[in-house]
Amino acid sequence: MNHPATTDTAATGSFLKQPRAVWAVAFACVIAFMGIGLVDPILKEIAAKLEATPSQVSLLFTSYMAIMGIAMLVTGVVSSRIGPKRTLLTGLVLIIVFAALAGSSNSVGAVIGFRAGWGLGNALFVATALSTIVSASKGSVAQAIILFEAALGLGIASGPLIGGLLGEQSWRGPFFGVSVLMTIALVATAFFLPTTPPQGRRTSLADPFRALRHPALLLLALVAICYNLGFFTLLAAGPFALPSFDIMQIGWTFFGWGVLLALTSVVVAPRLQRVFGTLPTLLAMLVLFGLDLVAMAVLTEHEAAVATAIIVAGAFLGVINTLVTEAVMGAAPVERPVASAAYSFVRFTGGAMGPYVALKLAERVGVHAPFWFGAIAVGVGVVILAAGTATIGRALHADAPSSHSPAEAEAELVGDLA
């Protein structure tokens, strides 16, 4: 990620001295990012309590991702017409309502459906959050980005742990917990955040599809589909490969995964990029992630090895998230929010069926099969990236949009979420 100069940060004082509006949105960001791993510790419990198969439970990821991917096409359209504050509040209301409805459900089908509504709300909120923090904060854009990244890392890392703590009481606990916390965030955002009128050009639904005409962006989106198949296979199949682990043990395992993901995305990825370059580093991390999935497939009967491999995967995933997004932002001569919308749509909707297919394989072939599936998918991504390196490299070295407005900074960072 390209961050503004650190001297700017030093000149404007501590980034902690921010208006209450900024802290309200940042708090909501933490809760929103928790949703990525919140359900992992309770997947087995949901399957047991609602008499569902692993593949049915995996649809909690599929519905969430598919709707979130589709919604990424419209977030810019909505925000550019009703303004960021109304978009934020709309997203928060949807998360509150659908998380509560999911927690009140008595069938796995209902939970799946309400999880999809949660994905819609999350897309509207997350896609607008950083630009709102930037516009409301005191000091530099660099300080606002640091605060946003801190919220991102805290949310991703704490999601599985909070899910485990609340899930020990009941599988419904994490859903109700999110609903309550988001209600607090909604009140704080509505009260402290001033009205934010629409800004910039009104985007259209056709813009992201036009962006995919650029070969480099399309290649990266295809790589991201393959990578997401491995990513969400890990999230969905991981808990079922740890049959003796209780809810908190799964929560701690994915907490370790989240901590490594957050740290490497913010700290390690930029350093590797500076030393080795974007595409060589990305290719190496994809290979390592694929090999990590192979290790899980081979060592499935050894739960300690699987748990260790899950945690280690977070290190590779954090670097991949950041570098893929960095490449996407420069892969097509279009505005960064448009490129981000096109890329997010393809990778989320394309990878949405991964968890379902993986756990269907687990039911019919064996618990090792999902990890072979994920490894093969990531391997295909490696081949696509290797074959398209020249095309992508030319695009990255060509003239690309040079400005870094809040909306463009938002597109870069939102793409890092997974």
Image (cartoon, rainbow, N blue to C red):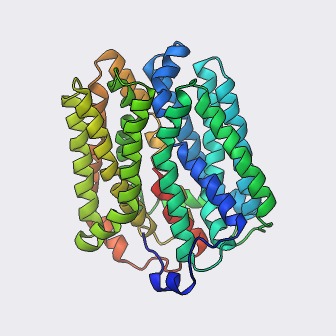
Which quarter of the image is occupied by the N terminus? bottom left
Which residue extends farthest top?
51
Residue sitting nearer the eye, 387 or 154: 154
Residue at x-position 48% and y-position 48% = 156
Does residue 358 appear left or right of residue 52 in this picture? left
Displayed quadrant of residue 355: top left
Residue at x-position 65% and y-position 28% = 102
Q: Compared to 59, does 142 lie above or below?
A: below
Q: How many numbered discs sit on the rendered protein?
A: 0
Q: Position of residue 310 (x, y in %)?
A: 31, 39
Q: Position of residue 168 (x, y in %)?
A: 52, 26
Residue at x-position 32% and y-position 29% = 370
Q: Compared to 234, does 28 lie above or below?
A: below
Residue at x-position 57% and y-position 45% = 68
Q: Position of residue 311 (x, y in %)?
A: 32, 43
Residue sitting nearer the eye, 210 or 314: 314
Can see residue 92? yes
Can see residue 335? no
Residue sitting nearer the eye, 175 or 364: 175
Q: Position of residue 160 (x, y in %)?
A: 47, 39
Does residue 146 appear left or right of residue 31 in this picture? left
Q: Compared to 412, does 373 lie above or below?
A: above
Does residue 381 appear left or right of residue 232 in this picture? left
